[in-house]
Structures are given as structure tokens and as C-alpha cells.
Image: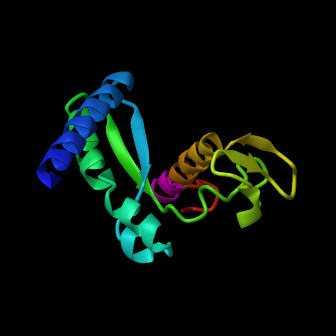
Amino acid sequence: MSGRQRRFRKDCDHVLSKRLARSVSSGATLVFEDLTNIRGRAKMRKVQRRRLHGWSFQQFQAFVIYKTEARGVSVGFVDPRYTSQKCSQCGHIERGNRPSQAEFRCKKCEYECHADYNAAINIREDFLKLRAAVNQPIVVCPEMGT
């Protein structure tokens, strides 16, 4: 039975990654949260841990990477900390900003939207900040002689 379930998940991951790769134009960048060691960091109840261990996110990301790179799309990763608790408008981080799984409501500025949408904006912004920090231009100032 476990082999059957594993093959089904693998097929689903292939189908979804193919759809995702086809939906992005060449030259674009897809950004994921870096979920390495998530199973060790997560503090959950026993029932939730079983569900977490069943996720195939690493396999899905591997499929997306090789399928998108073949189409000229790059893939980036960001630190997953607080992406779902941080307000994309004011930057306030609080657990209480997520009253439910699907809902985001900032305690500070009262911004409301779908929780996944808010997290996606935070992931994009974190990636852009990371990329800007890495790609700092070297500027020569003629007046200063440098």
C-alpha cells in the first residue's frame, strides 16, 4: 500500500510541477521557502507530525527546478521564518495576525487579506531584498577619487 501511495504522490508532483513550469514565462524567477530541516524544527502534535512527514515538498521542488530550468526559468529560496505572520503592508510580526488558516488580519494596521496571498507577497519581498543585498553595484565617485 505504501508503494502505491508513494507512486501516486510522485505522479501528482510531476503533474503539478509541469503545470507550474508551463505557467511561468522564460526569464522569470520562482521563489520557494527553504523548507530544509522543517521536520526537525516544527513543534506539532503527534497527528500533525504524521501529516507533515507525508508531505513531498522536497520532491516537488526538485521536479519544479529541473522542469523550469529547462524552460529558462530560475528558482530561488528564502528563509521561511515569519512569512505567514508578517504583515505585507506594515511589516508587523505577530502570531495573532493569523486568526485562522485562510485569514490574515494585521493587529497593528488592520490590513486584511487571504493568508496565502499575504505570505506570497512576503516571500517575494524577502527574495528581492536578498537579491539586492547580494548584487550591490560597485559605484565609482569621480569627485572622491574612488
The residue located at (15%, 43%) in the rendering is 7
Residue furthest out toward the right: 109
Picture coordinates of residue 47 (x, y %)? 44, 67
Q: Is residue 50 above or below residue 63?
A: below
Which quadrant would residue 71 be assigned to in this image?
top left
Q: Is residue 25 above or below residue 94?
A: above
Q: Is residue 143 above or below residue 64?
A: below
Q: Is residue 131 magenta?
A: yes
Question: Is 20 positioned to the left or the right of 122 in the image?
Answer: left
The colour scheme of the drawn protein is rainbow
The residue nearer to you, when weighing 25 against 84, is: 84
Picture coordinates of residue 18 (x, y %)? 26, 29
Q: Is residue 69 visible?
A: no
Picture coordinates of residue 13 (x, y %)? 26, 39
Q: Is residue 50 visible?
A: yes
The residue nearer to you, when weighing 52 against 15, is: 52
Q: Which residues are magenta?
A: 130-139
The residue located at (20%, 47%) in the rendering is 5
Q: For the C terminus, which image quadrant?
A: bottom right
Picture coordinates of residue 125 (x, y %)? 59, 48
Which quadrant would residue 92 be assigned to in this image?
bottom right
Which quadrant would residue 93 be assigned to in this image?
bottom right
